[in-house]
Image: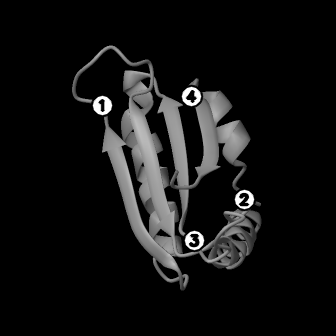
Amino acid sequence: MPNASASDPAAPVFRVDKFVVPAEALPEVIAQIKRVHTILEKVPGCLRRRVLSQTGGAGEFNVINYIEWASADAIAAAVQLVQQQFEHEGFDPAAFMKQLGVRADMGFYSEV
C-alpha cells in the first residue's frame, strides 16, 4: 500500500505500471488492463485511468498503465475489489504475464 505524502495525507497518489510486452501479446495485455479499468471506474477516488502504447522513442517499455487516485485511502477499496474479482475468476496476474513473456515495473508515485 502506498504512503501518502507526509505533508498532505490527502494528496493524490499515482499508480504507474510500465510493461515490456511482446508484439503478439499486445492485444491481450491491453484488453486485460482495460478490463481492470472498468472495475476501478466504480471505486470512489479513482480520478483518471489511461493505457498508453509507445509510438516512438527508444525506451524499452511499450505499454504504460496510469491511474490517478484522490488519496492513498482511496486505493484500499480498489485493491480489495480487484483481488476479490481475480479470486472469483481464478485469474493469476503473475502467471498471465509470465505466460505471455511480459516484464513489468510497477509502483506508486506522488507529486514532488
Q: Are marks 1 and 3 in contact (CB under 8 Å)?
A: no
Q: How far apart are marks 4 and 3 (CA)?
A: 31 Å
Q: Give the distance between the C-alpha atoms of the residues marked 4 and 2, in whole angstroms.
A: 24 Å
Which disc is residue 54 wearing?
1
Is 58 situated left or right of 21 in this image? left
N-terminal of the two: label 3 or label 2?
2
Under mark 1, the amino acid is: Gln
The nearer-to-camera label among 2 and 1 is 2
Distance from disc 1 to disc 4, alpha carbons, whole Å, reads: 15 Å
Q: Residue 24 or 40: which is nearer the viewer?
A: 40
The front one of 83 and 57 is 57
Q: Name the residue under label 3.
A: 11
**Disc number for residue 2:** 2
Q: Which of marks 2 and 1 is nearer the N terminus?
A: 2
Q: Distance between the residues labelled 2 and 1?
A: 26 Å
Q: Quadrant of residue 17?
A: top right
* Secondary structure under the numbered disc 2 in the rendered image: loop
Left or right, 30 with respect to 19, comes to left
Q: Which of marks 1 and 3 is nearer the N terminus?
A: 3
Q: What residue type is labelled 3?
A: Ala
Percent coordinates x, y for residue 33 in the rendering = 47, 53
From the image, state whether disc 3 or disc 2 is nearer to you.
Answer: 3
